[in-house]
Amino acid sequence: MSGKARAYYDLSRPFTLLPPILGFVSGAVTSWGSGHSHPPFDADLVLPVVLGGLMAGVLNAGNNAINQIYDLAIDRVNKPKRPLPSGALTMGEAWVFTGVTYVLSWILAFLVAPGGRHECFWIVLVTSVLTWVYSAPPLRTKRHGIWANITIAIPRGVFLKVAGWSAVKTVIGLEPWYIGSIFGLFLLGASSTKDFADIPGDRADGCKTLPILYGVRNAAWIISPFFVFPFFLIPIGVRLGILTGNPVLLMVLGPLLIAYGLYTSYLMVRKPEELASTENHVSWKHMYLMMMVAQVGFALAYLF
């Protein structure tokens, strides 16, 4: 891979692209298996899901790029080897990459239109606005404590799942939003795992993340419940008849994720100071793994 190609590859942060792709596809599979109506498995079903999964990855690459554009001062302190602070890419090249990926994601989202419905497109447009609000002035919610978490949790948690659902069935109804809320509540706390190691640069740039506002130890305790309690909504949803997937698999998935969340929380609160001294702390990795386990688990529960 050439130097420039490698720089664009690094700008997209490829490790972070799999969860949104998986989340979209999982949402589509969940939609297919919901209720008592299962659309026929043919090209008309598969194509919107494939296009939507590609859209989720492309949009996330654009989101990663715009975040690095506005975080340049922070990355010069925290991550100087990234493409922009290292000089591997110019600011203009990063803006072109961002523009191309955002426009491409909108086109792909518009093509996800089962039955002529463009619900996915409108969800993606709102998501794009939220990614801008998170990174860019004048709002730049990244600087404002819990608002940073909210503007991550809604697009990456709630809307991602609902967008995937829209590739198969309409999003009008309680079930897709209930499922999306589970993931949104998880990310409302779990998204802060990336902030601990970034304290020096964030503080210098005026970003008031939870670890800066409350200290490393207190912030670890604040976000720990979000690794556990959202997954109680799975058995509750089964009992209330909101979740229409395989009840046995869902009743296994809920406790499994609760146990996994308890383990991850233990890793954080056991030695919280390590969160601030280690880039990509193990809890950050487990956050992504928990997301993928939850996505796969929901897909399987609605597939069988």
Image (spheres, rainbow, N blue to C red):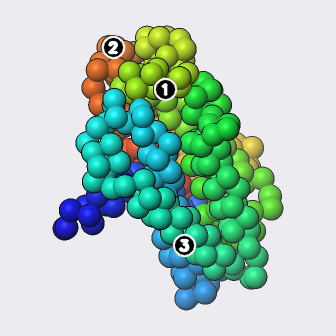
Q: CA distance from mark 3 to mark 1?
A: 31 Å
Q: Which residue is mark 3?
A: 104
* Earlier sequence position, callout 3 versus callout 1: 3
Q: CA distance from mark 2 to mark 1?
A: 22 Å
Q: Amino acid at mark 1?
A: Asp
Binning the other alpha carbons within 10 Å of mark 2 as few (below 14), some (14 to 19) or many (20 upward) gives some
Mark 3 and mark 2 in contact? Answer it, CB < 8 Å: no
Q: Which quadrant is home to the N terminus?
A: bottom left
Determine the image quadrant of residue 109: bottom right
Q: Amino acid at mark 2?
A: Glu
Q: Which residue is mark 1?
A: 205
* Earlier sequence position, callout 3 versus callout 2: 3
> Looking at the picture, how far across and down is residue 30, in whole percent?
59, 62
Q: Amino acid at mark 3?
A: Leu
Check disc 2 and report its element: helix, strand or loop.
helix
Q: Which residue is mark 2?
A: 273
- Residue in view at x 53 percent, y 25 percent: 207
> Looking at the picture, how far across and down is residue 128, in whole percent?
63, 56
Q: Nearer the viewer, residue 266 or 257?
A: 266
> Looking at the picture, how far across and down is residue 41, in whole percent?
56, 83
**In the rendered image, the vertical position of residue 193 relative to residue 62, given as above or below:** above
- Residue in view at x 63 percent, y 40 percent: 137
The residue positioned farthest toward the right in the image shown? 172
Mark 2 and mark 1 in contact? Answer it, CB < 8 Å: no
